[in-house]
Image: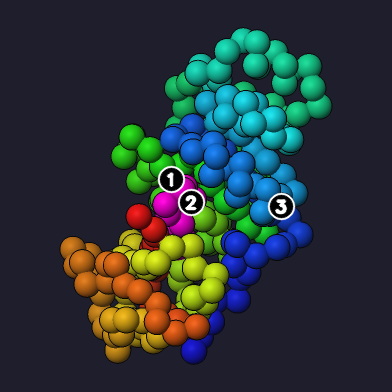
């Protein structure tokens, strides 16, 4: 099997970056997740600063136009050693994209995004597409919330049942077809399938062995590890 040589974003690594952005954040989940997964750097994006401040997280960088942040909170960080990257409201990139670029410029080994999902489906979909930037640089990046772990893969890989995020695993083709998809160790195995857009074939699978193999010849998969 041609394995993805990048480290998993859930593993301990030298330079893991957490980005807290402005979507919906379950603060109990964020606090618990951050306590279990140490980060070398935390970046708060616009309204994500409000959440990070409320949880008293040690921030390294804050990014945004800060139109949704109170002057008192912003002044607090202006008087600290936290790096502040301020951008106008009208610009060609979202604040989350800029934060990912900053994390990559800081040589992140992996990036976790929390607050990247929510009621604005356009932002959620855009954030999913932003995972292409770290993918191209062979840096693992995940979108996380209390129910979902979402990431992109362009090479075959393993999922260990003991380490999976939720009981369900789903796959969709991303930016074109996926060729020769084989699933081993799953409740619903596949052998050499050509996966195209518009199919729901690979939704809500389950891992039944200790190691599940996801093998494919070409393409990009978006992977959802989910729980109800």
Q: Name the residue under label 3.
A: 38
Q: Which residue is drawn at 29% across and 85% down?
A: 190
* Secondary structure under the numbered disc 2 in the rendered image: strand
Q: Mark 2 points at which residue?
A: 143
Q: Residue at x 72, y 16 (%)?
A: 76
Q: Mark 2 and mark 1 in contact (Cβ < 8 Å)?
A: yes
Q: Mark 1 points at which residue?
A: 127
Does residue 213 appear in the picture of this structure? no
Which circle, 1 or 2, is nearer the viewer?
A: 2
Estimate the spatial distance between the alpha carbons at disc 3 and disc 2, rounded to whole Å: 17 Å
Q: Residue at x 61, y 71 (%)?
A: 6
Estimate the spatial distance between the alpha carbons at disc 1 and disc 2, rounded to whole Å: 8 Å
Q: Mark 3 and mark 1 in contact (Cβ < 8 Å)?
A: no
Q: Quadrant of residue 224?
A: bottom left
Q: Residues within 10 Å of mark 1 (few under 14, many from 20)?
A: some
Magenta span contains residue 151: yes
* Secondary structure under the numbered disc 1 in the rendered image: helix
Q: Which of marks 1 and 2 is nearer the N terminus?
A: 1
Span colored in magenta:
144-152
């Amino acid at each position: 099997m041609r394995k993805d040589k990048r480290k998993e974003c859930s593993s301990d690594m030298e330079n893991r970056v957490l980005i807290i952005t402005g979507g919906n954040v379950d603060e109990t989940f964020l606090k618990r997740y951050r306590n279990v997964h140490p980060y070398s750097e935390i970046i708060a994006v616009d309204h994500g600063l409000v959440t990070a401040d409320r949880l008293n997280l040690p921030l390294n960088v804050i990014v945004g136009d800060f139109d949704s942040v109170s002057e008192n909170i912003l002044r607090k960080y202006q008087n600290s050693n936290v790096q502040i990257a301020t951008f106008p409201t009208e610009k060609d990139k979202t604040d989350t994209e800029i934060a990912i670029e900053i994390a990559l410029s800081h040589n992140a080994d992996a990036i976790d995004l929390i607050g990247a999902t929510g009621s604005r489906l356009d932002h959620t979909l855009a954030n999913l597409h932003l995972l292409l930037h770290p993918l191209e640089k062979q840096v693992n990046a995940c979108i996380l919330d209390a129910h979902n772990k979402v990431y992109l893969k362009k090479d075959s890989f393993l999922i260990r049942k003991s380490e999976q995020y939720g009981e369900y695993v789903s796959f969709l083709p991303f930016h074109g077809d996926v060729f020769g998809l084989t699933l081993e160790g799953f409740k619903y195995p596949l052998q050499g399938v050509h996966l195209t857009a518009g199919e729901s074939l690979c939704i809500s699978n389950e891992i039944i062995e200790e190691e599940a193999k996801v093998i494919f010849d070409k393409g990009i998969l978006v992977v959802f590890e989910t729980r109800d």
